Amino acid sequence: MEIGNHLKQVRKAHQLLQKDLADRAGLDRSYISKLERGLGDPTWSTLTKIADAYGLSVPHLLNYGNEENFSLDVDAAIDALKTLKYNMVKVELNIKPL
């Protein structure tokens, strides 16, 4: 899916008008419209402002609605976290009882 359509879907999922998102993100409403119509590519700075407006990280914004839940055994999870730490990737771990 192209990023403009994705940004529009995220905004609608949050039940915001373009004006509301623009106000929260400190951007112009017409710029939000342009992005959503695929007439421009957002910079990282713009994506950060939009993500912040939703209280999300940029990766979460870009993957919004596509989250998957999966289970790993404890040893596999620890190995995965060590690999991510070694590669200096920010890791968020949410553990919930089954």
Image (spheres, rainbow, N blue to C red):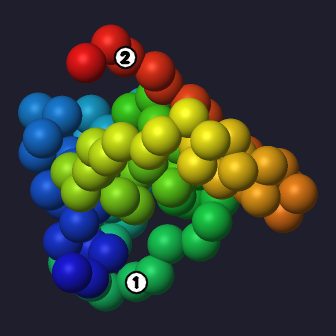
Q: Which type of secondary structure does the marked residue at label 1 adopt?
A: loop
Which marked residue is nearer to the observer: mark 1 or mark 2?
A: 2
Position in image of residue 5 (x %, y %): 18, 71
Residue 16 sits above or below residue 81 on the image:
above
Residue 6 sits above or below residue 55 on the image:
below
**Residue 78 falls in image quadrant:** top right
**Residue 89 falls in image quadrant:** bottom right
Image quadrant holding the N terminus, namely bottom left
Residue topped by disc 1: 40
Q: Amino acid at mark 1?
A: Gly
Of residues 42 and 61, the one nearer the viewer is: 61
Q: Amino acid at mark 2?
A: Lys
Q: Which type of secondary structure does the marked residue at label 2 adopt?
A: loop
Name the residue: 65% across, 53% down.
Answer: 80
| Mark sitting earlier along the chain (1/2) | 1
Residue 86 sits above or below residue 90 on the image:
below
Name the residue: 27% across, 73% down.
Answer: 4
- Residue 96's label in the rendered image is 2
Q: CA distance from mark 1 to mark 2?
A: 40 Å
- Residue 86's label in the rendered image is none
Residue 14 sits above or below residue 61 on the image:
above
Of residues 52 and 73, the one nearer the viewer is: 73
Contact? badges 1 and 2 (CB < 8 Å): no
Position in image of residue 85 (x %, y %): 82, 50
